[in-house]
Image (cartoon, rainbow, N blue to C red):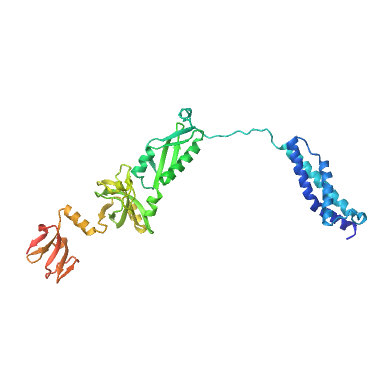
């Protein structure tokens, strides 16, 4: 380890190790001086500063012993040479970086489209402009129509925003506000230079998604709707190829306004009271929740036939009321002197028990029939 090669290798290794930190500091100082005072930091100054810092670090670490000049003189000289080269290189590069950095240079600001002068003239004292809806509210394909209340609110809405915003930012902020205020599942706004916006919106997700049970899908179909149909009704849909059972989610009379979805809660809001008012009947669209396996049959149906099933706790009375409105009141008759029509017999009593299988045995004594005298024949 006392030979020339060994001492040289030790000097190079420790020169790189202890000289890197001081050289980096010298380079950064050259950058700072060049920027702050617009002067170049001489590489010689950097080298002179780095060499003693490197030797001092090695002495503190016990690698160099300045007192042992003969024993450690060679390694100290080699380490100082390496540190000198590092200091000169980093200082030179720092001065070059400071010289090439752009200063007092302005960059062009690229702006998007903004409001026109006509809209700017309408800015209030607070620097805000009013954005107004124009034209009918558009719908997204594949989504149910908006409820009448939400549609009217969007068509008559007025929204204030800072007038110095670009149109793209105004559109983004308006979409965020509409989505928050009305819970819309999807919304897109297009604002022109005069501050008028065209809105495309889809109803709240909670109107459809949370009303669907697992394994069901919402499907919108068109056809002849029964009078009084409303959200929450159970319906039977005949597609010629299949009979599908479903629950009504929304009713649209074809004018673009739909009865809102309200299938779980009692009518506590104005919007729900509109829904429970029912539908007058006629052509329209119906959004129903059906089993996933039945969705394809509905989508392929060209002219589905829709019927409403009795529902609720008093479904028997509801069914009786519907039969009476159709001219076939339910009545109880004795079978001693007459025989009811089997097609309109609801149930018969035999031996003190009621049977509802549709047959009329000869030993039955009483029966419930739908229709009255025309359906009860004398024996």
Task: Out of 309 and 149, give the one closest to the viewer.
Answer: 149
Q: Position of residue 267 (x, y in %)?
A: 31, 50
Q: Quadrant of residue 334?
A: bottom left
Q: How many marks?
A: 0
Q: Position of residue 127 (x, y in %)?
A: 49, 32
Q: Is residue 258 visible?
A: yes
The residue at 27%/46% (across/down) is 283
Classify 122 as above or below 260: above
Image quadrant holding the C terminus, namely: bottom left
Task: Out of 96 and 58, give the one closest to the viewer.
Answer: 58
Task: Out of 337 and 237, give the one closest to the viewer.
Answer: 337
Q: Residue furthest bottom?
A: 351
Q: Position of residue 208 (x, y in %)?
A: 38, 51
Q: Residue furthest right?
A: 70
- Using residue 14 as the reference point, say whether residue 376 is left or right of it: left
- Using residue 339 as the reference point, say whether residue 136 is left or right of it: right
Q: Is residue 140 visible?
A: no
Classify 346 as above or below 298: below
Image quadrant holding the N terminus, namely: bottom right
Q: Position of residue 122 (x, y in %)?
A: 45, 29
The residue at 76%/47% (across/down) is 24
The residue at 53%/35% (across/down) is 112
Q: Quadrant of residue 8?
A: bottom right
- Using residue 173 as the reference point, say whether residue 51 is left or right of it: right
């Amino acid at each position: 380890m006392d030979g020339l090669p060994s001492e040289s290798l030790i000097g190079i290794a420790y020169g790189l190790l202890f000289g890197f930190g001081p050289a980096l500091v010298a380079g950064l100082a050259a950058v700072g001086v060049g920027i702050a005072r617009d002067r170049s930091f001489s590489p010689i100054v950097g080298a002179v500063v780095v060499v003693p810092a490197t030797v001092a670090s090695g002495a503190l670490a016990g690698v160099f012993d300045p007192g042992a000049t003969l024993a450690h003189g060679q390694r100290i000289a080699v380490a100082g040479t390496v540190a000198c080269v590092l200091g000169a290189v980093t200082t030179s590069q720092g001065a070059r970086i400071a010289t090439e950095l752009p200063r007092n240079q302005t960059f062009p600001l690229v702006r998007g489209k903004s409001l026109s002068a006509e809209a700017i003239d309408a800015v209030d004292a607070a620097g805000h402009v009013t954005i107004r809806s124009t034209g009918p509210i558009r719908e997204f394909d594949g989504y149910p129509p908006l409820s009448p209340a939400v549609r009217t609110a969007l068509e008559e809405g007025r929204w204030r925003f800072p007038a110095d915003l670009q149109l793209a930012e105004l559109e983004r902020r308006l979409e965020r506000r509409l989505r928050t205020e009305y819970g819309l599942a999807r919304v897109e706004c297009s604002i022109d230079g005069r501050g008028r916006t065209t809105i495309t919106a889809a109803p709240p997700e909670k109107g459809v998604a949370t009303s669907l049970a697992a394994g069901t899908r919402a499907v919108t179909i068109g056809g002849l709707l029964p009078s009084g149909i409303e959200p929450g009704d159970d319906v039977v849909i005949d597609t010629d190829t299949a009979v599908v059972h479903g629950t009504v989610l929304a009713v649209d009379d074809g004018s673009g306004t739909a009865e809102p979805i309200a299938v779980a809660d009692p009518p506590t809001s104005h919007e729900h009271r509109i829904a429970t008012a029912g539908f007058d009947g006629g052509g329209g669209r119906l959004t129903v929740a059906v089993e996933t396996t039945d969705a394809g049959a509905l989508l392929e149906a060209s002219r589905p036939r829709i019927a409403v099933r009795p529902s609720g706790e008093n479904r028997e009375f509801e069914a009786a009321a519907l039969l009476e409105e159709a001219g076939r009141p339910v009545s109880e008759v004795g079978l001693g002197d007459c025989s009811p029509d089997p097609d309109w017999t609801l149930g018969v009593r035999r031996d003190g028990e009621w049977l509802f299988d549709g047959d009329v045995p000869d030993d039955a004594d009483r029966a419930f029939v739908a229709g009255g005298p025309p359906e009860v024949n004398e024996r």
